[in-house]
Amino acid sequence: MQLYKRYIDVIVRQRKNGELIPLFVCWEDGRRYKIDKILNKQRRASEVGGCGLRFSCLIEGRQRNIFFEKDKWFIESHQP
C-alpha cells in the first residue's frame, strides 16, 4: 500500500531541556487522536520523502510514524 506525506497539527509538550513530547495528532476537520505511547524516537528518513525526528507511536492501538521536520509535523498516511 502506498504511503503519502500528510502535514498535521500536533499538540506537543516541550520540556525545559528542549525535549519534544507529542501528545495528540489533530486532523483538519477537528478530530484529534491521543498518542497512547511513544515506542521509539530517532532521526530517520521517511519512506514518503523528507527526514527529521521520527516518533514511532501507538495511536488508538495502531503503530504510526510521525515526523518533526524542521518546523512542521507530518505523518506517513495511507490517504493523500
Image: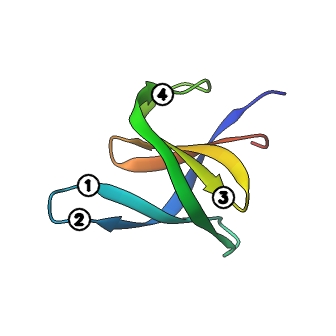
Question: Does the image show residue 60?
Answer: yes
Residue 76 horizontal/vertical position (percent)? 64, 39
C-alpha gap between disc 3 and disc 1: 20 Å
Task: Give the residue number, with chain letter if any, for mark 3.
Answer: 59
Q: Residue furthest bottom?
A: 30
Q: Callout 2 environment at 10 Å: few (<14), some (14 to 19), or many (20+)? A: few
| Residue position for label 1 | 19
Calculate the distance from the C-alpha at mark 2 to the C-alpha at mark 1.
Answer: 5 Å
Count of numbered badges drawn on the protein: 4
User: Along the polypeptide, which appears first: circle 4 or circle 1?
Assistant: 1
Q: Residue at x 47, y 41 (%)?
A: 40
Task: Look at mark 2 in the image and give the residue it sits on.
Answer: 15
Work out how far the residue at label 2 is from the one at label 4, CA to CA, in angstroms: 25 Å
Residue 77 coordinates in the image, percent (x, y): 71, 42
Element under disc 1: loop
Q: CA distance from mark 2 to mark 3?
A: 22 Å
Q: Quadrant of the N terminus?
A: top right
For this view, does 27 lie left or right of residue 10?
A: right
Task: Residue 63 in the image: state x and y as whole percent.
Answer: 68, 46
Seen at 69% across and 35% down, the residue is 4
Q: Which numbered disc, 3 or 1, marks the residue that appears first in the sequence?
A: 1
- The amino acid at mark 2 is Arg
User: Which residue carries the number 4 mark?
Assistant: 50
Three-letter amino acid code at the position of disc 4: Gly
- Badge 3 marks a residue whose secondary structure is strand
Q: Is residue 27 above or below residue 63?
A: below
User: Residue at the location (74% across, 42% down)?
Assistant: 80
CB within 8 Å, label 2 to label 1: yes
Residue 74 vertical placement versus 15 (above, below): above
